[in-house]
Image (spheres, rainbow, N blue to C red):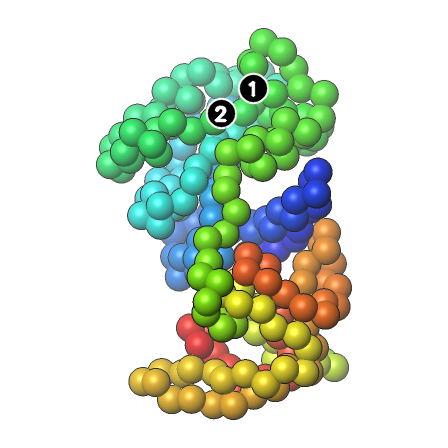
Amino acid sequence: AKNCSVIWKGVKINIIDTPGHADFGGEVERALFMADGAILLVDSSEGPLPQTRFVLRKALEAKLQLMVIINKIDRKDARPLEVLDEIYSLFIDLGADEDQLDFPVLFAVGRDGVASRDLNKPGKDLHILMDTIVEYMSGPVYDPSKPFQMLVTDLSYNDYLGRLAIGKVVNGSVTCNQSLVCLKDEGVQKRLKISKLQVYEGLKLAEAKEVTPGDIIILAGIEDVNIGD
């Protein structure tokens, strides 16, 4: 999965691009754990594909807030309204409840960077997409009484920093050089100290002094950490 972030009208939106194939089932589930909502992107000609069904089922099971974008409506063989009917049928077939069926729909041409709520009124930009995310998808829910908690959902490596642990802050806050406890399999506890704390700014990484619930962060200086810790 690829991560990035966007600041829109004072709100930080973390964006996670999940793999779209059932072959990456474990990675899809880990990515969904970091999300509070999901955008289902469907081609206006191809319609829902087998992998669409797989990823959507995982998102529905996770009770994520969902919105739909029907993309590539400029194709000559585009059939956006038929595809929308197929999407509704897929939701129903997967057991979506009434709230999950009440999703916003946008029509887009991703290549041109435009989206619209009205198929007959072409979009000028992607402002409507960002507005819909802020309006429709709520922020992270957390317990203010709990200490810092994050689940390691991905790992990376840097030649200078060593192993990097990636995940979403579920509760609490943390600062660089703070001491933490890593909870491993079977309750084993391991003390560790963060040497570098980073977040996503756009497509790049930036150092952070402190992070709070909802932030997707990258911790460095903790060698003996695995996915699921």
Q: How many numbered marks does the figure carry?
A: 2
Residue at 55% x, 33% y: name it. 135
Q: Secondary structure at mark 2?
A: strand
Q: Residue at x 67, y 26 (%)?
A: 114
Quadrant where the image shows the N terminus? bottom right
Callout 1: SS: loop
Q: Is residue 204 visible?
A: yes
**On the image, numbered disc 1 is attached to which residue?**
117
Is residue 35 visible in this depiction of the protein?
no
Image height of 111 relative to 172, above or below: above
**Is 213 situated left or right of 88 in this image?**
right
Query: Which residue has dot 2 on it?
Result: 105
Residue at x 56%, y 51% (from the top left corner): 16
Viewer-proximal residue among 9 and 4 = 9
- Whether 8 is drawn above or below 140: the answer is above
* Snapshot quadrant of residue 183: bottom left
Residue 18 lies, in percent from the top left, at 51, 51
Q: Residue at x 70, y 43 (%)?
A: 10
The image shows residue 145 at horizontal and vertical percentages of 46, 67
Mark on residue 52? none
x and y percentages locating residue 210 in the rendered image: 67, 68
Q: Is residue 45 left or right of residue 92?
A: right
> How far separated are the C-alphas under marks 2 and 1?
6 Å
Assess whether mark 1 and mark 2 are in contact (beta carbons under 8 angstroms). yes
Q: Quadrant of the C terminus?
A: bottom left
Identified by mark 2, the residue type is Val
